[in-house]
Amino acid sequence: MVISGVAPVATAWLTKSVLDELIAGAPAGRLVTLGVVLAGVSAVAGTLPHLTQFVRAELDRAVALLAQERLFTAVGSYVGLGRFEDPRFVDQLRLADQAGRSTPSQTVDCLLGSVRSSITIAGFLGSLLLLSPVMAALVLLSGVPMLLAQLSLSRRRARMLLSIGPAERRELFYSHLMTGADSAKEVRLFGTGAFLRGRMLNDRRAADTAKRAVDRRTMLVQTGLGVLAALVSGGGLLWAVSAANTGAFSVGGITMFVAAVAGVQATLVTLTGQVAGTHQALLLFDHYAAVTTAEPDLPLAVAPCPLRPLRHGIELRDVWFRYSDEHPWVLRGVNLFIPHGTSMALVGLNGTGKSTLVKMMCRFYDPTRGAILWDGVDLRDVDPTALRERIGTVFQDYVQYDMTAAENIGVGNLSMFGDRARLEDAARRAGIHDALLALPHGYDTLLSRVFFMESEKDDPKTGVALSGGQWQRLALARALLRDQRDLMILDEPSAGLDAQAEAEIHASLAKYRNGRTSLLISHRLGAVRNADSIVVLANGRVTEQGDHDSLMAARGAYARLFLLQASGYRTGGDLSVSLGGQS
């Protein structure tokens, strides 16, 4: 950048010297020397853009990589889920990701470009000062309104980009709906393609209208600045011609004057554009800074208590929870004890707080009131990573990784990621081993049709899409890879399975749960009847607790729901069941 900044000034001075020496009748040797030097400087100036482009690209890649590493390291350090379930934070995270990819390299590039432009301006201004201090001052002052105008435009453009962010994200959302495989069936069956396309185009038009308004203002301002620059340079040229006519300027001096004025003005335009670009980028970079410097989302103990293997049990003591002060209570004074080595089932209607309770036991959230204790130790006093190392889980909304079958299981326990024997054992217990062996490349088959070249799309060996039930079993195998953990949480582990597969899975899980601490959540009450204890949640409270037989004998909500489900398998006769005067 330094050489690039000096080269134009050196070229102008050498050109002036060549012309003046030529007119003065200097010896040929001197003219040749000056010509060689001028040619050398021109050659350097001609090759510098290519070298600069390569170095700039290398710098862009290095800086962007560092920025991305810092962003996702910060995101990965968040302990809980609250920020990821907050739409405002999700919007900010998307903007931070966009800014992290481009802003750092753009800022560095603009700063270095400003160094180059400053050197060029300093060189040409120094030359103008020697020729005409008054013109040097006028040219420099003409850059002040240019800089102020560019900064104003950059602020306006940054505000515009922030304001159209929601519209652009909705546009992407509708675009994904119309092109994604997951939504293709419904879009075609319901005939919503034109409806979604209309909404997408409306959001695009709204964004384009905002961009057009800024572009129009930019055009008008820059046109006015161009007229101002033309007036200054035109007036300067007339003055230089007049000075040359009186003998105050040589031919080379006029050449140098014209080059200096044009060079200062052109470089001022570049410099103000770079400063404005940096200003705009840094305004958007606030989102990146906010994400990477955010305070912990959950309080962390300064000196965490050691978390020993579970020996007594897990207790929920007067646990209340709501997602914010504006939300209703999800849990209302839950008191519950899960003894070590026993299996407990949570049942209840949708929205009663079952999954929220699981999130809290994994310390994705903290109780709003009350405490959750692990052998008497509050979960808030232990290291969350140490806690999660002791828990195995199948979530209801498990992840389908675009990886190989082996990798999809292995991510459940990275310490066994490459242990094929353990992976296969977990798959056998989940009832998916034979299906994985039958894939084109067995466990090494990619379970995705996303990452392929166009020429590979018709080759079935490049990737396979599993059925929903097969994915459910694979997620279960992932959890079973953590079978040595103190607590296993199974949230609807058989939701996507047929009746036979469900019976097989629960028989396998019953063997696994024997003598182990486990928590099972299921809407299919037949799957939980063998649990040591069954807890019924309603309206955020524990309303019933006991084993299957005692709850059936109590003829309460559990018995009513169990018989209601069972009635669907009966044939003939009256399927209604009377429970305490209710049916």
Image (cartoon, rainbow, N blue to C red):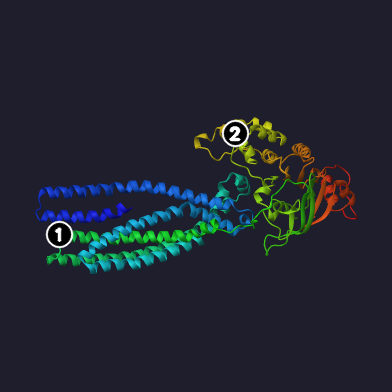
Amino acid beneath label 2: Thr
Q: Secondary structure at mark 2?
A: loop
To which residue does mark 1 refer? Answer: 251
The residue under label 2 is 445
Looking at marks 1 and 2 on the same chain, the residue that comes earlier in the sequence is marked by 1
Dot 1: element? helix
> Along the horizontal axis of the image, is 5 left or right of 512?
left
Residue 559 in the figure: left or right of residue 227? right
Q: Amino acid at mark 1?
A: Val
For label 1, the crowd category at 10 Å Cα-Cα, with few meaning under 14, some 14 to 19 and many 20 or more, is some
Note whether 423 is above or below 214 in the view shown: above
Residue 531 appears in which quarter of the rendering? top right
Quote the CA–CA distance across marks 1 and 2: 77 Å
The residue closer to the viewer here, 245 or 80, is 80
At x 18%, y 56%, the residue is: 16
User: In terms of depth relative to the viewer, which is nearer, 62 or 97?
Assistant: 62
Q: Position of residue 395 (x, y in %)?
A: 69, 46
The reply, left or right, for residue 407 in relation to residue 156 is right
Percent across and percent down for residue 239 are 19, 67
**Residue 168 shows in this picture:** no
Quadrant for residue 435, please give it: top right
Q: Relative to 25, say whether 410 is above or below.
A: above
Q: Which mark is residue 548?
A: none
Q: Is residue 430 left or right of residue 525?
A: left
